[in-house]
Image (spheres, rainbow, N blue to C red):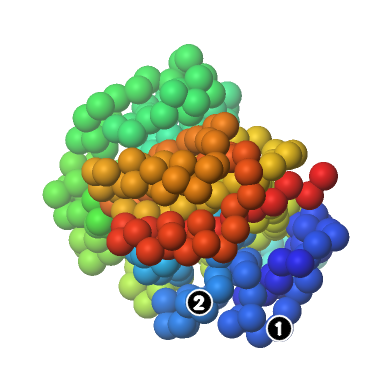
């Protein structure tokens, strides 16, 4: 029986996916796995028995990834599960920045009691004019699940699209409309785009990637949209550019004291994934990832360990090992297993930076002595054995 603790309210359609063999506990330190949305885990102690954390969403800034990796705790996220919700809001943000739709709606509300409101509206509408998205150039920074969806949707609305992503994966590339121009120079994208929308995670490399120098390169009168993270943008430099009109509008999903007080900014209260459909999708994906790992040892969509998938565990046993990505570890492991008379039928080893994960499928009985021997190896962070239930 695996014990699950939900740090936030998780959609029932997801938790129901766990089913038999799982129970939900109120005490975080008693759980084998946590499911989280926005709760900040950086100040929490990681229990000794914690095996995994599933983030029902894409961003993992609220989770101590390095500390988890060092303990052999797998951190999952749910990339793409909320992509459609965010994509739709980005498109909405573009359209709101093109035309003063909000100002027009407010005008009607303010004049709702005027019996001549219809007649007056014909004259008032001139002050709420705007421009069309069709025919404009949209620069998309980051072509992952959300960025690619935005790029494809915008090009279908008649815009020209430039996409920038130095880490573009093959899967993402296949999903892009062939009319999208893939550029390798961020400066060129900034200087040519009427709209710039950013869709990358915050890392040591991307933090502040749109700084004063990059903002200065933007096409005069351009609109910047940020539905990724506020830390990606130098907000002081942006405020200055908005103040003098070099940047026309800033549309952001991250309200903070800086963005909330910017001139010509439309700031939303982090609504990107706030749809019932997105919450359901994220919960289902998180539960599916957890179950596959806990029962089969497979790791899919982890942010601190590489992907390993040996399929369902139907017979025999598997040994899951988390260890340092260092020379000689695999040799030590296979020697220890063979010395106990176990035969390795299948094995997968994947590393990500300093972290490595090895999943062994063996014939023979893996007892506590074997696991104890493996744990005694200096490079092993965590060792667990999984048994087929069929």
Q: Secondary structure at mark 2?
A: loop
Which image quarter is the N terminus in?
bottom right
Q: Residues within 10 Å of mark 1 (few under 14, many from 20)?
A: few
At which x and y percent is residue 292?
66, 48
Which image quarter is the C terminus in?
top right
Is 121 placed left or right of 112 in the picture? left
According to the picture, the residue beneath numbered tag 2 turns out to be 48
According to the picture, the residue beneath numbered tag 1 turns out to be 26
Q: Residues within 10 Å of mark 2 (few under 14, many from 20)?
A: few
At which x and y percent is residue 167?
33, 34
Relative to the observer, which residue lies in front, 41 or 217? 41
Q: Which mark is residue 326?
A: none
What residue sits 71% from the left and 71% below the top? 3
At which x and y percent is residue 303?
45, 52
What residue sits 20% from the left and 54% below the top? 211
Is 22 placed left or right of 175 in the picture? right
- The first of marks 1 and 2 along the sequence is 1
Relative to the observer, which residue lies in front, 74 or 386? 386
**Is label 1 or label 2 in front?**
2
As drawn, 139 above or below 322 = above
What residue sits 48% from the left and 14% below the top? 178
As drawn, 124 above or below 341 = below
As drawn, 263 above or below 137 = below
Is 10 placed left or right of 273 in the picture? right
Q: CA distance from mark 1 to mark 2?
A: 17 Å
> Is there any visible trace of residue 141 in the rendered image?
yes
What residue sits 35% from the left and 59% below the top? 377
Q: Residue furthest left?
A: 213
Give the quarter of the image for residue 220: top left
């Amino acid at each position: 029986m695996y014990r699950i603790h939900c740090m936030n309210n998780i959609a029932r359609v997801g938790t129901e996916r766990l089913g038999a063999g799982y129970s939900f506990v109120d005490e975080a330190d008693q759980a084998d796995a946590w499911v989280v949305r926005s709760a900040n885990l950086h100040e929490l102690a990681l229990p000794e028995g914690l095996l995994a954390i599933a983030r029902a969403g894409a961003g993992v800034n609220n989770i101590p990834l390095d500390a988890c990796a060092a303990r052999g705790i797998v951190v999952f996220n749910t990339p793409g599960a909320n992509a459609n919700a965010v994509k739709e809001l980005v498109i909405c943000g573009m359209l709101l920045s093109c035309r003063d739709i909000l100002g027009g709606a407010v005008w009607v509300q303010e004049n709702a009691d005027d019996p001549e409101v219809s007649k007056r509206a014909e004259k008032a509408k001139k002050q709420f004019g705007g421009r069309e998205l069709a025919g404009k150039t949209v620069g998309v920074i980051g072509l992952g699940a959300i960025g690619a969806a935005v790029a494809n949707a915008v090009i279908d609305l008649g815009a020209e699209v430039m996409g920038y992503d130095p880490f573009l994966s093959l899967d993402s590339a296949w999903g892009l409309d062939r009319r999208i121009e893939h550029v390798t120079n961020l400066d060129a994208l900034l200087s040519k785009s009427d709209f710039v929308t950013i869709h990358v995670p915050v890392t040591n490399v991307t933090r502040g990637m749109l700084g004063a120098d990059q903002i200065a390169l933007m096409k005069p009168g351009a609109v910047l949209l940020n539905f990724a993270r506020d830390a990606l943008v130098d907000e002081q430099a942006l405020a200055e550019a908005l103040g003098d009109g070099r940047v026309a509008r800033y549309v952001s999903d991250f309200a903070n004291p800086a963005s909330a007080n910017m001139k010509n900014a439309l700031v939303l209260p982090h609504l990107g994934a706030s749809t019932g459909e997105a919450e359901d999708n994220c919960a289902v994906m998180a539960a599916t990832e957890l179950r596959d790992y806990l029962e089969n040892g497979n790791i899919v969509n982890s942010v601190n360990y590489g992907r390993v998938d040996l399929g369902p565990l139907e017979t025999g046993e598997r040994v899951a090992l988390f260890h340092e990505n260092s020379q000689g570890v695999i040799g030590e492991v296979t020697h220890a297993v063979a010395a106990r008379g176990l035969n390795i039928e299948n094995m997968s080893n994947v590393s990500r930076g300093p972290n490595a994960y090895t999943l062994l499928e063996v014939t023979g009985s893996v007892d506590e002595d074997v696991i104890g021997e493996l744990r005694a190896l200096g490079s092993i962070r965590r060792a667990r054995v999984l048994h087929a239930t069929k």
